[in-house]
Image (cartoon, rainbow, N blue to C red):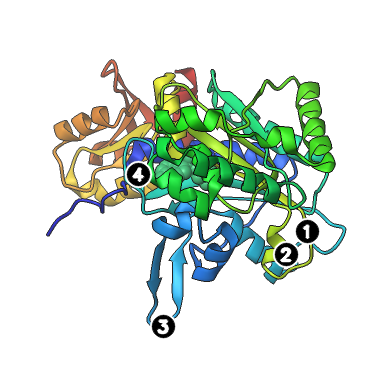
Amino acid sequence: MDYRAPKGTADMLPETARAWEHMQRTAQELFARYGYQPLYPPVFEHTEIFARGIGEATDIVSKEMYTFEDRGGRSVTLRPEATASIVRASLEHNLVPPGSVAKLYFMGPMFRYERPQAGRMRQFWQIDAEILGAAEPSADAEMIALLARYFETLGITGTTLLVNSMGDDACRPQYREKVRAYIREHSEQLCEECARRADTNPLRAFDCKKPTCRDVMDLAPKLRDELCRDCAAHYSAVKGYLDDLGIAYVEDPSLVRGLDYYTRTVFEIQAPGLGAQNAIGGGGRYDRLMEQFGGPPTPGLGFALGFERTLLVMQAQGLRVPAPATAEVYVARAQPEVASAVFELAARLREAGISAELDHQARSLKSQFKQADRLGARLALVVGPDELAGGEVTVRAMATSQERRAPLSGIAEVLQGLLAEG
Ligand code: AMP
C-alpha cells in the first residue's frame, strides 16, 4: 500500500498545524473588530454553483475542478474557492435582506487540480472574507485595509498591495472587444493559449507569466483609460480612502483576477521571495454575482488569502509561532502499584490548568525521567508507596535534578507557584 498522501496534498504536521491555528486565531480576533461573523458552507456544492458563478471560460472551471458524480447521480464539486458558496448560502438563508449588509468569513480547505509546486497545492487552505450589500467605495477600502492589516498583524513585512478597477457592464464589454482585437493583431507574438484567449476570455491574457506575452500585453489598451464615469469615480474614491488610511498601494492596470465575476475594484497582496506564486491574498468586488444566482441585485466584495504561501513568507521572515507547553509536569511512578494514584494525579493537575503527562508504557523510573526530558517537562512528580502513605509526593526540578517533598493536598497550587517562578 502506498502511504504517501495524494499528489498536491500534504499532511499538516504539528508545527505547520500550529501555524495554521495561529493564523485562524489571528483572523478571528481581527475580523471580529471589523464586524465579521463566521459562516461555514459545505466543502462540496452542486457543480453549477461554481460553473456559473466563477465562469465557464476560467481556468478554474475549465480545467481545475474536482468534479464527480455522487452515488445519487448528481454532479458535485469540491469547492475551488469560497465566494460562490457564501453567495449561495446567503440566498438560501436570506442573510442579506434589501437594505442590509452582511459581513462573513470562514476558513478551510479548497481544491484545484493544478500543477503542484511550492505554494501551489491541489488541496490548500484559505481564509475568506465577504461583504454583501455594501456598494460604497468605503467598503472596498475597508476590505483592502483588513487584508493588509491581517498580514501586518502576523508580522509580515515587505508586501506590495496592487489595485485596479475592472469596470462594470457599462464599460467592460467594449474594452474586452478592444483587447480581443489587440490580441488578434498580435497573435503571432503571443503563446498559443493567449492567442486562443481572444475567443474565450481575452482579459486573461494579462495574467500570462511568459515574458514575451507580458511584453505584448504591457502595450495593450488599459481599462483604466476607458472606465465609465461611475467606475472611474468609484475607483478614485477607493484610492482616496486608502490614502486617508496611509495604506501604500501600486496601481496595476494589468491586474485581472482569474474569476469572471469581478466588477470594479480588484486587489492583490504580493510578498517577496515566492517566485511566481507571490500572491498571498487577493479579491475584489462582484456586484452582479447575486443576480447571476437568481437573487435580487446585491453588491458584494471579498478576499481570500492562502495559508501555504503565507506560511512560506513567515518562515522566510523568521516569524515563529510559539508552541504551547504540552507537558509542564511529568507525573512519574516509582512503583507499578501506584499507577492509579499517578493516573488520578495527572488528571487533577490538568483540571487545575497545568499540562501534565504520565507514562502509559510501563517504563522504568529512569526512562520516565528521560521521557520527561524529551517532552520538555520542567517538573516531575515522583509518586511512590512510602510518599503516598505519608500523604506526600516528591517534586523534582528536571533541569537540576533537585528534589523535595510536598504535601499531596494542594499540590496543584505548589506546582503552579513553582512554574510561575520560572
Ligand atoms: P485566488 O482565489 O486564486 O485569488 O487565491 C487566493 C489566495 O489563495 C492566493 O493569493 C493564494 O494565497 C491562495 N491560493 C490560490 N490557489 C492556491 C493553490 N493552488 N495552492 C496554494 N494556495 C493557493
Q: Residues within 10 Å of mark 4 (few under 14, many from 20)?
A: few
Q: Earlier in the sequence, mark 4 or mark 1?
A: 4
Asked whether, in this view, residue 331 is left or right of residue 180, the answer is left
- How far is disc 2 from disc 3 in space, using C-alphas? 28 Å
The image shows residue 51 at horizontal and vertical percentages of: 52, 64
Q: Which residue does the image show at 66% across and 23% down from the upper left?
A: 249
Identify the residue at the far top of this view: 400
Q: Is residue 133 above or below residue 70?
A: above
Foreground disc of the pair 2, 3: 2
Q: Secondary structure at mark 2?
A: helix
Find residue 84 and report its image quarter. Answer: bottom right
The circle drawn on residue 291 is: 2
Find residue 160 and report its image quarter. Answer: top right
Q: Amino acid at mark 3?
A: Gly
Q: Secondary structure at mark 3?
A: loop
Q: Amino acid at mark 1?
A: Thr
Find residue 87 and report its image quarter. Answer: bottom right
Question: Pointer 1 and pointer 2: residues touching (CB < 8 Å)?
Answer: yes
Asked whether, in this view, residue 119 is left or right of residue 48, the answer is left
Q: Earlier in the sequence, mark 2 or mark 3?
A: 3
Q: How many marks?
A: 4
Q: Earlier in the sequence, mark 3 or mark 4?
A: 4
Q: Which residue is mark 3?
A: 73
Looking at the image, can residue 18 be seen? Answer: no
Q: Amino acid at mark 2?
A: Glu
Task: Choose between 169 and 241: the one closer to the eye.
Answer: 169
- How far is disc 4 from disc 2 in space, using C-alphas? 38 Å
Q: Is residue 229 above or below residue 88?
A: above
Q: Which residue is mark 1?
A: 298
Q: Which residue is mark 4?
A: 12
Question: Pointer 4 and pointer 1: residues touching (CB < 8 Å)?
Answer: no
